[in-house]
Image: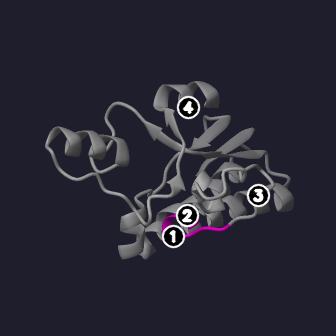
């Protein structure tokens, strides 16, 4: 970081199912890892630190209440170890902003899709299962709403 002026922090454990089975990995990477990056960025007087988070820190949207939308004032309501660890890292970033007048921002992105995705993520999994005449996995009652952004659109937005 000594030769950088901007840090964009993408690093995270992000598999919700894995977070339920191995929560300590998510705390280590998403919370403690963020703290280490923040301390290092502060030490090197980074001009801008952008933390990539997730919309999952806000909980879930439901088809039963289509008027409800998330925005930057929505209270946090994490529902998995993954989203709790990301919410914790968001709070650390905000604490650095307030405590140290640290130049940081946060974006709460929704799901990305595109080339080179892990096959167990929902879009490749649905496609592979459909091609192979396997059932499509539905979580819960199938009433949750998720947004998806193409990865290059997300990259353009962040740039």
Q: Are marks 1 and 2 in contact (CB under 8 Å)?
A: yes
Number of the label disc, if any, that sits on residue 80: 1
Numbered disc 1: secondary structure = loop
Q: Mark 1 and mark 2: span between their CA atoms?
A: 5 Å
Q: Mark 1 and mark 4: span between their CA atoms?
A: 24 Å
Q: Mark 4 and mark 2: span between their CA atoms?
A: 20 Å
Residue carrying label 2: 83
Q: Residues within 10 Å of mark 3 (few under 14, many from 20)?
A: few
Number of the label disc, if any, that sits on residue 154: 4
Q: Mark 4 and mark 3: span between their CA atoms?
A: 22 Å
Q: Residues within 10 Å of mark 4 (few under 14, many from 20)?
A: some
4 above or below 74?
above
Labels 2, 3: front one:
3
Residue 131: in sight, yes or no?
yes
Q: Which residues are magenta?
A: 77-83
Residue carrying label 3: 74
Magenta stretch encompasses residue 78? yes
Residue shown at the point (15%, 45%) measured from the top left: 133
């Amino acid at each position: 970081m000594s030769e950088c002026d901007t840090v964009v922090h993408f690093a995270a454990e992000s598999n919700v199912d894995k977070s339920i089975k191995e929560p300590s990995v998510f705390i280590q990477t998403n919370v403690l890892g963020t703290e280490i990056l923040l301390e290092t960025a502060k030490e090197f007087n980074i001009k801008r630190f952008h933390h990539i988070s997730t919309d999952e820190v806000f909980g879930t949207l439901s088809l039963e209440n289509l008027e409800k939308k998330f925005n930057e004032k929505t209270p946090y309501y994490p529902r998995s170890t993954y989203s709790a660890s990301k919410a914790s890292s968001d709070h650390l970033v905000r604490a650095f902003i307030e405590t140290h007048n640290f130049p940081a921002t946060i974006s709460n992105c929704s799901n990305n899709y595109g080339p080179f995705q892990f096959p167990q993520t929902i879009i490749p999994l649905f496609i592979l299962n459909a091609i192979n005449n396997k059932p499509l996995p539905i979580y819960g009652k199938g009433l949750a709403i998720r947004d998806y952004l193409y990865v290059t659109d997300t990259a353009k937005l962040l740039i």
